[in-house]
Amino acid sequence: MFCPFHLSQDGIEAQFATNHIGHFLLTELLLDKMKSTVKTSGVQGRIVNLSSIAHTHCYKNGIRFAKLNAKEGYNDKRAYGQSKLANILHANELSRRLQEEGVNITVNSVHPGLIMTSRVLIEQVDHELEILNFFRFFLCKNVPQGAATTCYVALHLRLKGVTGKYFVDCNEMTPSSYARDEALARELWCFQPQID
C-alpha cells in the first residue's frame, strides 16, 4: 500500500502485481474447481474480491494500460487506487461472464474499511497521512468489524444470486464511474494474458 515504484519479479508494477494480478491468477486457478463443485453440489459459489474505497483515487482514465510498468508519472497513491479499481473491474467482468455461461457463482467486491491491524498508518506515515495516523483509533475498525462486510457478502442468505456489486459496511454501494465502466472491465480482462 502506497509503496515506492518498483517492479515485481515478473516485471509488473508491484502494487498492481500484488493487489490485482495475483488475485486474478488465483481466481483463474480455482475457477474450474469451483464450477465443478457448484455443479455437483447444487450450492451457489461465491467469489469476493477485496477492493478499497481508494479505487476512486486512481489515474486519469482509470488504468494506465500503456504505462502500467513505467516509473514516469508514477504516483504511489494513484497506483494503489488503480490496483483496487482493477479488483472491482475484474469482479464485474467475471460476474458477467459467469452469468453468460449460466454458472451459479456470484462475484462481488467489498471495501472492508481501514482496519486497526493495518500497520501502514503507523509505519508508512507521510505528510498526507499524518492527520489520519493521529485519528486512527477513531477511524479504524477492529478485526471483527473489518471482516464483517467480507463475511456478509460471502455467506449471507439475503445475497443469494446477487452478483457484480460493490459493498461497504454490509451495504451495496455505487462505486466510481470507472468501476462501472464495462468497456474498461473488458479491456482489463483482455490485458491480463499479456502480463501473466
Image (cartoon, rainbow, N blue to C red):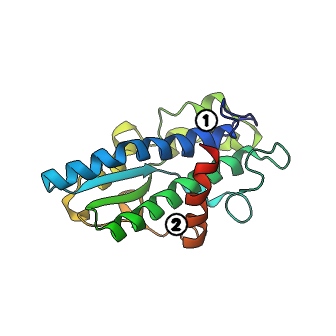
Q: Residue furthest right?
A: 72
In which quadrant will I find the C terminus? top right
Q: Which residue in the protein does label 1 denote?
A: 121
Q: Secondary structure at mark 1?
A: helix
Q: Is residue 164 visible?
A: no
Q: Residues within 10 Å of mark 1 (few under 14, many from 20)?
A: some
C-alpha distance separating marks 2 and 1: 24 Å
Q: Residue at x 61, y 35 (%)?
A: 121
Q: Nearer the viewer, residue 74 or 192?
A: 192
Task: Look at label 2 and name its amino acid.
Answer: Pro
Q: Residue at x 62, y 60 (%)?
A: 56
Q: Nearer the viewer, residue 36 or 178?
A: 36
| Apparent side of residue 33 relative to residue 56 in the rendered image (left or right) | left
Q: Nearer the viewer, residue 174 or 29?
A: 29
Splitting the image into 4 quarters, where does residue 127 fall? Answer: top right
| Apparent side of residue 29 relative to residue 128 in the rendered image (left or right) | left
Are dots 2 and 1 in contact, CB under 8 Å?
Answer: no
* Numbered label attached to residue 187: none
Splitting the image into 4 quarters, where does residue 3 fall? Answer: top right
Depth-wise, is mark 2 or mark 1 nearer the camera? 2
Disc 2 or 1, which lies upstream in sequence? 1
Q: Nearer the viewer, residue 193 or 175?
A: 193
Q: Residue at x 30, y 67 (%)?
A: 162
In which quadrant will I find the N terminus? top right
Q: Which residue in the protein does label 2 denote?
A: 175
Q: Is residue 4 visible?
A: yes
